[in-house]
Image (tube, grey):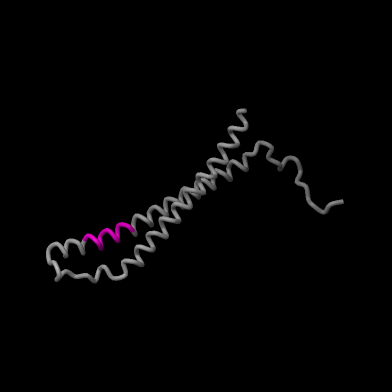
Amino acid sequence: MSDKIIPPPETLDPSGDHMFQRMSKDFIDAQQAVNRTVQELRVKVRNMYERLGHTLTELEHKGPEARLEPLAGLHEEGAAVERTARILSDQLEHLERGCDAVRGVSRKVRL
């Protein structure tokens, strides 16, 4: 005999509601994660845009006397933007694969 405990029939969920509730929660969690990544990317891009904009304005008005200090470390900030964009791209790719899998189930059911 097996030592595995089998739950009584009344605790089983033949409708699959638990699975759909879990999928719904996972989707909401994924949506919130994507939204956080988008917000983080917006902040990083906006910061770079402002730094570059201020420097450009100074260059246009002061020429060679413009302050160039705001450009220091710009490559690190650009790398952070690129990493965050890659994370967002990966998140969207995972979501798309998940949606495709769910659509695959519904197509098989319709056949």
Q: Determine which quarter of the picture holds residue 72.
A: bottom left
Image position, residue 62 (x, y; %) = 12, 67
Image position, residue 18 (x, y; %) = 62, 42
Q: Determine which quarter of the picture holds residue 76.
A: bottom left
| Overall secondary structure of the magenta section | helix
Residue most toward the left? 61
Image position, residue 43 (x, y; %) = 34, 57
Q: Which residue appears at 37% of the width and 56% of the height?
A: 41
Q: Which residue appears at 39% of the width and 59% of the height?
A: 82
Residue most toward the front? 64
Q: Which residue appears at 71% of the width and 41% of the height?
A: 12
Image position, residue 65 (x, y; %) = 14, 71
| Relative horizontal placement of residue 65, taking residue 86 as reference (left or right) | left
From which residue to which does the magenta span run? 45-53
Q: Which residue appears at 25% of the width and 60% of the height?
A: 50
Residue most toward the top? 111
The answer to which of 103 and 30 lies nearer the viewer is: 103
| Relative horizontal placement of residue 6, taking residue 89 as reference (left or right) | right
| Relative horizontal placement of residue 88, taking residue 24 as reference (left or right) | left
